[in-house]
Image: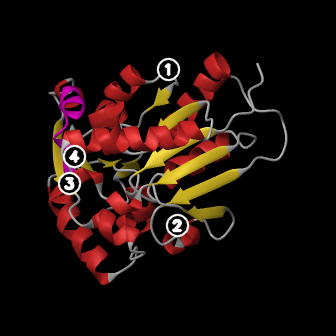
C-alpha cells in the first residue's frame, strides 16, 4: 500500500530529533514533519492538564499538514497524554516510554537507573510499568535543568557536566549496570555521560524501538512512501539556531508561532 503523506512528530523542543534520526535512518524514503514546541519546554514541569492541552495543540498543527501518523517524540507527553490523544483522533499515535523492560530483564546486579523528567517519573503510566519489575531496584532521578541547558545549546557546558555528575554518581555507587534515558533530549548527552559512568554500565534509550514500531504501523496500517528522495521539514516556535545546529544545517527549519 502506497501512502505519500508525511510522518508527523512532536516534542517539547529539539530533543525529539533523536527519535526523528532513528526513524529517518530506518525509513529513509518517508517524508517527515517535525514540530519543536521549544517555547513551552520543558513539559516535565507542567501539570497533566497542561501537557494534554499542549499535545492537542501540537496534534492539530500536524494534522493540518496532512500527516498519516503521529509520533509523540516526548516521554512526558506520551506518559501523560497519549491515551487522551488516541481517544480524540483517528490517526495512529506512536508513543515513547522509558525502556525499563530491557534494562530490568538484562540487569545482572538487579539495579538500574533512570534519568527522566518529573512529569514522566510522576505519571501513572510510568508507575504502572515500574510495578511490573519489583525484583529490580530502580533508582529514579529527575533531570532538573538538563532540558533547559540542551534547549539553550549548552550541551557541553561546565554546568551540564556538574549536574550530570550529581545525578549519576549515586547510581554508580548503588551498582547499577543499566542507565535508562527517559527523555528524548537526553541521548544528546550520551558522549558526556560516557565520560562519567564506568564502561560496564549500558545506556538505553528508546529511539530504535520507536523507529521499529513506526515501520510496523506504516506497513500494517497506513502505507509507505514511494521509493525516492524524502523531504524533511522542521518547525520551531523559538529561535531556530539551536535546532539548526543539532541538524547540522542539513534540513529546512521554519520558525512559526503555534
Q: What's the distance in space between the residues labelled 1 and 3, CA to CA?
A: 29 Å
Q: Position of residue 63 (x, y in %)?
A: 55, 36
Along the polypeptide, which appears first: circle 2 or circle 3?
A: 3
Relative image position of residue 124 (x, y in whole percent): 18, 30
x, y percentage for residue 39? 37, 62
Spatial CA distance of label 1 from label 4 is 26 Å
Disc assigned to residue 119: 4
Task: Evaluate if marks 3 and 4 touch, with contact meaning CB atoms under 8 Å apart.
Answer: yes
- Of residue 206 and residue 37, the one placed in the foreground of this image is 37
User: Spatial distance from mark 2 to mark 3, Cα to Cα?
Assistant: 22 Å
Residue 243, label in figure: 2
Q: Where is mark 1, residue-wise?
A: 90
Mark positioned earlier in the residue sequence (2 or 4): 4
Q: Earlier in the sequence, mark 1 or mark 4?
A: 1
Labels 1 and 3: the sequence-earlier one: 3
In the image, taking residue 2 as reference, residue 188 lies left or right, namely: left
Is 123 magenta? The answer is: yes
The answer to whether 42 appears left or right of 152 in the picture is left
- From what the image shows, is residue 59 above or below residue 38? above
Which label lies toward us, 1 or 2?
1
Q: Residues within 10 Å of mark 1 (few under 14, many from 20)?
A: few
- In front: label 1 or label 3: 1
In depth, the one of 62 and 242 nearer the eye is 62
Using the rendered view, name the quadrant where residue 41 is placed. Answer: bottom left
SS at badge 2: helix
Amino acid at each position: 500500500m502506497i501512502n505519500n503523506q508525511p510522518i508527523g512528530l512532536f516534542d517539547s523542543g529539539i530533543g525529539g530529533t533523536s527519535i526523528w534520526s532513528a526513524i529517518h535512518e530506518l525509513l529513509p524514503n518517508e517524508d517527515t514533519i517535525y514540530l519543536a514546541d521549544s517555547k513551552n519546554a520543558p513539559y516535565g514541569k507542567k501539570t497533566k492538564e497542561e501537557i494534554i492541552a499542549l499535545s492537542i495543540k501540537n496534534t492539530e498543527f500536524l494534522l493540518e499538514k496532512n500527516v498519516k501518523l503521529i509520533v509523540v517524540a516526548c516521554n512526558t507527553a506520551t506518559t501523560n497524554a497519549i491515551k487522551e490523544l488516541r481517544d480524540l483522533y483517528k490517526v495512529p499515535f506512536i508513543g515513547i516510554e522509558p525502556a525499563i523492560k530491557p534494562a530490568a530483564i538484562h540487569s545482572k546486579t538487579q539495579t538500574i537507573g533512570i534519568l527522566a523528567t518529573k512529569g514522566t517519573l510522576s505519571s501513572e503510566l510510568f508507575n504502572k510499568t515500574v510495578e511490573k519489575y519489583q525484583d529490580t531496584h530502580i533508582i529514579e532521578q529527575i533531570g532538573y535543568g538538563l532540558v533547559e541547558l540542551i534547549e539553550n545549546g549548552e550541551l557541553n557546558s561546565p554546568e551540564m557536566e556538574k549536574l550530570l555528575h550529581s545525578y549519576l554518581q549515586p547510581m554508580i555507587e548503588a551498582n547499577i549496570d543499566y542507565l535508562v534515558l527517559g527523555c528524548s533530549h537526553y541521548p544528546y548527552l550520551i558522549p558526556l555521560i560516557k565520560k562519567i559512568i564506568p564502561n560496564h554500565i549500558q545506556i538505553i534509550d528508546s529511539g530504535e524501538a520507536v523507529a521499529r514500531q513506526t515501520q510496523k504501523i506504516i506497513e500494517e496500517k497506513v502505507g509507505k512512501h514511494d521509493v525516492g528522495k524524502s523531504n524533511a521539514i522542521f518547525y520551531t516556535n523559538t529561535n531556530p539556531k539551536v535546532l539548526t545546529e543539532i541538524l547540522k544545517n542539513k534540513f529546512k527549519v521554519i520558525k512559526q508561532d503555534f
